[in-house]
Image (cartoon, grey):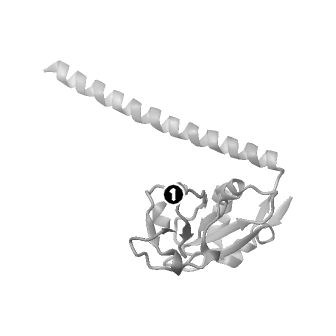
Amino acid sequence: MNRLIKDITTIQTGLFAKPLGEGDVIYLQVKHFDELGQLQSVLHGDLLSADIARKHLLQAGDVLFAAKGYKNFAAVYEKHNEPAVASTSFFVIRPTNKNILPEYLAWFLNNHSTQTLLKTQAIGTAIPSISKQVLEALEVPVPEIKTQQAILHIATLRSREKAIKQQIEMLREKQIQQQILEAINYER
């Protein structure tokens, strides 16, 4: 069953703040993530909690969607120790319906077809941006939880397969280069 994302979530923009370089609240920015939405940075507090409205604090299961620029991705926020807020580069999408898993929603937003659709509706030429209205009007297929879990499992296995293939290719290249060097040294 397809549902509009606005009917199964709340969507709010991230917080505009100037990182202080120290504090007790992490300020999540796009630069902390790779193209696939995987956290790539060690995070430290950049803001003071006294300056942050409670509504901006991220909760476990919030989906962060990078809507500005050419690097659009979704990532599920997993709460660890320090509180965190998202920068204005993100929309914070909080599922309100128990029939959708945050990880499935992030997978759907990262899906190539969804990304293509959203990019065609982006506004701005120098820095394209996906508006909240475009995001709210997005239709999300919401299968049963078991099906969502199966989709996520398949996606995880496919990611592992790609990583293993890449590792095999890298090792194969090393092996070939080593054999070439040995052949050159053998002729001396």
Residue at the far right in the pictured view: 1
- Which is more toward the observer, 101 or 4? 101
Q: Tell me which corner region of the image, top left, top right, bottom left or bottom right, holds residue 21.
A: bottom left
Apparent side of residue 61 relative to residue 21 in the rendered image (left or right): right
Q: Give the x, y percent position of residue 156.
A: 63, 43
Mark 1 closeness class: few <14, some 14–19, many ≥20 residues within 10 Å: few
* Residue type highlighted by circle 1: Glu
Q: Quadrant of the C terminus?
A: top left
Q: Residue at x 58, y 75 (%)?
A: 14
Question: Residue 120 occupies which quadrant of the picture?
Answer: bottom right
Which residue is more in the foreground, 120 or 131?
A: 131
Q: Quadrant of the N terminus?
A: bottom right
Q: Does residue 148 lie above or below 122 as drawn?
A: above
92 relative position to 138: left or right: left
- In the displayed structure, 112 sits above or below 124; it is above
Q: Is residue 60 left or right of residue 183?
A: right
Residue 110: percent from the left, percent from the top? 63, 58
Q: Residue furthest left?
A: 188
- What SS does tag 1 mark? loop
- Taking the spot 47% from the left edge, 62% from the top edge, the residue there is 32
* Residue 98, above or below 186: below
Left or right of residue 20, residue 82 in this image = right
Q: Residue furthest top?
A: 186
Q: Which residue is mark 1?
A: 35
**How many labels, in total?**
1
Q: Name the residue furthest front.
A: 50
Q: From the top left corner, tell me how far across and down residue 76 is, in percent.
A: 62, 58
Image coordinates for residue 179, horizontal then vertical, percent: 29, 24
